[in-house]
Image (cartoon, rainbow, N blue to C red):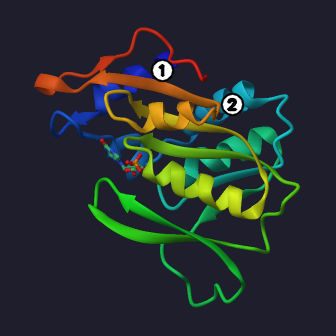
Amino acid sequence: MNSLKQKILTEGKVLSDSVIKVDGFLNHQVDPAFMQSMGEEFSSRFRGCGITKVLTLESSGIAPAVMTGLCLGVPVIFARKRKSLTLHEQLYSAEVYSYTKQESSEISVSKDYIEANDKVLIIDDILANGQAALGMVDIVNQVGATLEGIGIVIEKGFQEGGEVLRKRGIHVETLAAIASLADGQVTFQTKEVLSQ
Ligand code: 5GP
């Protein structure tokens, strides 16, 4: 998605050879119209899959997931990172190691909002080693629901997450795939990595 690549180039800040800061439009401030265009792109890529639910992880996945759910006309559920006092219900939970915080945490989804007959699209902001995505895949599997695919705003192609997910046969779509952040420069992948 060229508009996203432009935004990454103009507003992204390369913090190291492996980390990019995109607070200006994804992780802190949100540009709603731009977010909507990403939702439209995800929904066009997964239209026809019969998606009944979008699943994401709080907090940075929520904005792109909501826009995707709006375009697909389906509800959006976000996994909680901390058990809320109001989350008394039965939960599906999975362990996730956070790449940026370098600590493990449990993510949870109430059994009230996801069912075995759901066809689930997972949406997340950034794919690095795939831990967050795998945690959500784990929850979909516990539910017995069908995973239709994973939509990622920014994939860091030099880390293993994309390969791990595609090797499992999961349909992964990314809007911008970064090949390298070396020397403070963002280089995009020239070829789309296709799902196996
Ligand atoms: P993973 O679970 O794939 O290893 O890491 C994905 C999560 O870590 C994303 O949801 C994102 O919040 C965070 N993350 C990983 N790499 C980066 C990065 O380079 N920049 C930012 N801003 N977040 C990242």
The answer to whether mark 2 is within 8 Å of ligand 1 is no
> Residue under circle 1?
3
* Above or below, 117 relative to 33: below
* Above or below, 108 relative to 142: below
Nearer-N-terminus badge (1/2): 1
Q: Amino acid at mark 1?
A: Ser
Q: Which of these two is toward me, 152 or 93? A: 93
* SS of the residue under disc 2: helix
Q: Position of residue 14 (x, y in %)?
A: 20, 34
Q: Callout 2 environment at 10 Å: few (<14), some (14 to 19), or many (20+)?
A: some
The label on residue 40 is 2
Residue found 53% across the figure and 46% down from its top: 124
* SS of the residue under disc 1: helix
> Which quadrant would the C terminus be assigned to in this image?
top right
Q: Position of residue 19 (x, y in %)?
A: 24, 40
The answer to whether mark 1 is within 8 Å of ligand 1 is no
Q: Callout 1 environment at 10 Å: few (<14), some (14 to 19), or many (20+)?
A: few
Would you identify the image quadrant in which residue 102 lies? bottom left
Judge left or right: residue 4 versus residue 180. Answer: right
Q: Which of these two is toward me, 182 or 167? A: 167
